[in-house]
Amino acid sequence: MRLILLGAPGSGKGTQAALLQEKLNIPHISTGDIFRSNIKSGTELGKLAKCYIDKGMLVPDSVTIDLVKDRLRQPDCNNGFIMDGFPRTIPQAEYLENALKEMGMHVDAALNIDVPDEVIISRISGRRICPACGMSYNVVSNPPRTEGICDSCGGRVVHRDDDKEETVVNRLKVYHEQTEPLIKFYEARGKLKTVDGQGSVEESSKRVFKVLGIE
Ligand code: AP5
Ligand code: MG
């Protein structure tokens, strides 16, 4: 399956992608995670991305598209992928459509995880992530089994630098202006599926699996 996850920051894309990856055994590609791992290891890409991410702005399309182009060439993408956080602009969506067409492929579904802005702000304030493997937790709704320690890899979980409230407000504004139009883009192509992302992680996951026909 070639799946795209749409949804505001904090809607649960990363959380659902991890569950989908386990279920479908296809790679979870998060452009945000790739940028964060480059920031951590101090690469040129990381330095550039950090200037934008810390302000809650999008990294320029040319940079992000080159990164995804390389990632899609990896052999683990041959049987499908879960794209989390890409595309995020119309030019990125057009690039992906054309790149897949050239490979004789297409997106099977664009899944929009729908969560109101008020819920987003409170979720993000409680989020903790594992910088080593990218797993996402929440101190209130989805804590790790041992406080402060990642269930998946044993790393120490931390607060994300761009999760400060003023940055989150800007990320939401950018989402509404630049990414929300993708809902219509995929609807026009008959690929859009929308799920309510409120309630618990398990409830959202049940809806996601159902709408994708993979219960
Ligand atoms: P990115 O890392 O993609 O961030 P984002 O889109 O802002 O999304 P988040 O990761 O914040 O949220 P999520 O939807 O994954 O939610 P999560 O599952 O963690 O991008 C970061 C930055 O990189 C961007 O701002 C941009 O600068 C740059 N970038 C990335 N891609 C780009 C692109 N294509 N083009 C240009 N720039 C790009 O859940 C959130 C919290 O809620 C967690 O604490 C979780 O435990 C909790 N939670 C999840 N589901 C539930 C539930 N059902 N009930 C209760 N709590 C829940
Ligand atoms: Mg995420």
Image (cartoon, grey):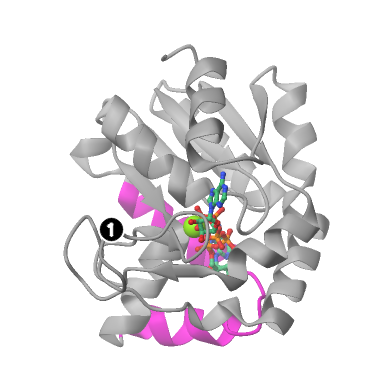
> Residue 200: within the magenta?
no
* Residue denoted by label 1: 145
- Quadrant location of residue 46? bottom left
Task: Please state if 172 lies on the left or on the right of 47 as rendered.
Answer: right
Task: Please state if 117 lies on the left or on the right of 31 as rendered.
Answer: right
Q: Please give the name of the residue rendered at 53% of the width and 40% of the height, measured from the top-left corner.
A: 96
Q: Nearer the viewer, residue 65 or 146?
A: 146
Q: Could you say where residue 2 lies in the image, as x and y percent from the top left?
A: 43, 27
- Ligand 1 within 8 Å of the CB at mark 1: no
What is the magenta segment's predominant secondary structure? helix
Label 1: which secondary element: loop
Q: Please give the name of the residue rendered at 67% of the width and 75% of the height, measured from the top-left corner.
A: 57
Q: Please give the name of the residue rendered at 52% of the width and 16% of the height, measured from the top-left corner.
A: 210
Q: Is residue 94 above or below residue 107?
A: below
> Residue 50: within the magenta?
yes
Span highlighted in magenta in the image: 43-71
Q: Could you say where residue 10 lies in the image, as x and y percent from the top left?
A: 60, 58
Asked if residue 60 can be seen in this view, the reply is no
Q: Nearer the viewer, residue 206 or 59?
A: 206
Q: Is residue 171 above or below residue 40?
A: above
Quarter of the image with the C terminus is top left
Q: Nearer the viewer, residue 34 or 23?
A: 23
Q: What amino acid is labelled 1 in the image?
A: Arg
Q: Could you say where residue 143 lies in the image, as x and y percent from the top left?
A: 40, 60
Q: Please give the name of the residue rendered at 53% of the width and 27% of the height, measured from the top-left corner.
A: 208
Q: Could you say where residue 111 lies in the image, as x and y percent from the top left?
A: 59, 31
